Amino acid sequence: MLKENVRRTDAIHTKFNPVTGEGSIGERVKVEITDHPLPVQYLPKAMMDEPLVQKIIKAGSIKKFYSEHLADICPYSQAEKEKIISQLIRIRCKHDFAFWAVLYIYVLSKNPGEGEIHFRLNRAQRKLVEKLEKMRLSGKPIRLVLLKTRQWGGSTCIQLYMAWLQLVHQQGLNSIIVSQRKKTSFAIKAMYDRALEAYPAEMLHELGEAYNANEKKMVNVGLTGDYKKIPQRDCTITIASYEAPDAIRGDAYALAHISEVGLWEATEKKTPEKIVRSTIQGISYKPYTMIVYESTANGAGNFFHREYVDAKKGESQFEALFVPWIDVDWDTLPFDSEEQKRTFAEQLYANRNNETANSTREEPGSYLWWLWTKGATLEDINWYIVERSKCRCHADMASECPTDDIEAFSFSGRKVFYDEDIEQFTDACRPPRMIGEIYGDADKEEKAIQNLRFVKDNDGSLFVWHDVEKDTEEEEITDRYLCVVDVAKGVSAKADFADILVIDRLPMVDGEPPVVAAEWHGHIEMDRLAWKALQVAAYYNNALLVIESNTLETNNTKGEAEYILTLIADVYGKQLYARKQSAEDIRQKIPKKYGFHTNPLTKKVVIYNLQEVIRQHLYVEREEECLNEYRTYIETEKGGYEAMEGHHDDRLMTRAIGMQICLHEMELPRIVKRTKRKNTTNSTVISAATI
């Protein structure tokens, strides 16, 4: 471990010199120009295509190059040499962001009292720029979703990279900064102002072009301060916020920096999706355009989480990048001695299987060992232990200093399901094969299940991954399909959704897990939902229909709830799920109670079972949104269960109830011959003797 720690530490401290280019970003070529102020440089490979660079490298010195190509025009002098060096610097600035940044850009140091310093990329920032440069150099539009740990200058780096495109590469690249609060947007722009104030005016012009050394580099457009213009580059910078998005519309942007979008909370009048769409709708999909969503994580299932997941899966035009705390240069704590380090390593290894933490401000040995397997050095883990003691729970630390992108989307509250367990289900999730609705000859009563047919409709609420396989006239499969219903309270936009889940149990015959076949998800009145569920269940070969009855009974009078369920039972018969009756209930001929009643006791039972199902990967999920509900489901301080604020659990509850009944109450599917009625027209008379 100690040898491996040395190797990791050496890799972290690999030489990085942005001036000479040694150890800098991207593929580099070692170049020697004997009379250059930097006689040995490591230049970006793309610079080798520049004619001037090619000729000087071939000559080996500026003087020899001049004598071979320019001596007939003007005698060689120090002034002529300086002009050539200036040209080389401009060319390199165009190809080498790290060089341009350290040479011309000043930022405010994080160290108190240090003031402004040259912008020298740290390790995490180099990782970010390398990702951006890979897209730019391939001729692609720059599209990135950045999930980050805290306090390493990610926002600063993004904004200055945009400035590089505006100031060095192309004129007319208008940019916009949108953060949660306008104060934050102005802070980001203030950093831009500071950089531009120290930026040489001559670099805003072509080499040799006349300019005024005192000319303004940035001017206000209007009176609000929301719009700035750099006249020399004919580009604007717009400041906006999620809280006050009025400044967003009205300009043709090429560059958009959407900051801390994970913290944006949806309201009745606006959502992150709408504000982002308004911001980026005019940005063309072409080179030298740039859209970046960056944020620390703020739970799962929100806009930022969905965008990151889609980018990571390669399903959007964006690419994903995660920067963990391990990549941050100052998130490390040296040991006082080598002996202390050795003892630390021994204890780390000895406790690698320990699953118990000594307090809420510590992590168990197994977790600390996991940090080692993720590439952390011993010094990094030492820092983590000290930093962790500031937090009362793991989720607080994980959201601020995540180790991987799964852990990053944690949140306060005790999670019911482990992220690692949930991830097992992601590969099987996919878009539905069909979207639409199921219709009968009527919306209710017996005709509701006559002439059932599926009608495709992209605006429908029924998602179908596996269509029904109808039984034949000769045989049928019993106990194959299960239909579970979670009833919603209300139909407003803020209300929970109603959910109808269909599970195909046929794979269980071969020892395989059951599969989500279809799901209806939407807002609908309770009585209409019951009939809709009946249609779905009947369509799927008269599946066992399980309706969660607690919401019905809570939001209607007892008589109304029983009436709705009794109507369904009259049409659907024994395929409507009824609670088990005791012997005494049967003796007294007490009517059956239809539906699955969710109370504190039964809820614990189904959630405990679902924990086991998810841990053991005992079914196949198709809907990605259900996994987001798993990620945002928490145990309350009083021992109850609920979705975290702003999230739902309707899909989760149909799985919880469904898996309980699917795995513990139903028989395995069986193929049985259909019973044909005997034609008795010409049959012999059955008498008592015959019997």
Image (tube, rainbow, N blue to C red):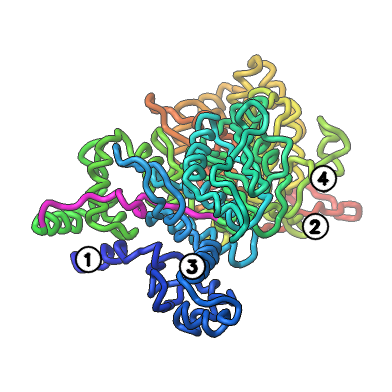
| Disc 3 secondary structure class | helix
Q: Which residue is mark 3?
A: 79
Residue 247 visible at all: yes
Q: Residue 42: name its quadrant.
A: bottom left
| Of residues 396 and 478, the one drawn nearer to the viewer in this rendering | 396
Count the marks: how many? 4
The reply to whether callout 3 and callout 1 are in contact (CB within 8 Å) is no
Instruction: Name the spot of residue 633 as percent of width and height, x first.
Output: 48, 36
Q: Which residue is mark 4?
A: 457
Q: Closer to the camera: disc 2 or disc 3?
A: 3
Q: Residue 206: name its quadrant.
A: bottom right
Magenta region: 320-337
Residue 685 lies left or right of residue 569; in this view the side is right
Res 473 label: 2
Residue 159 lies left or right of residue 494; in this view the side is left
For disc 1, the neighbor class at 10 Å (few under 14, some 14 to 19, many from 20) is few
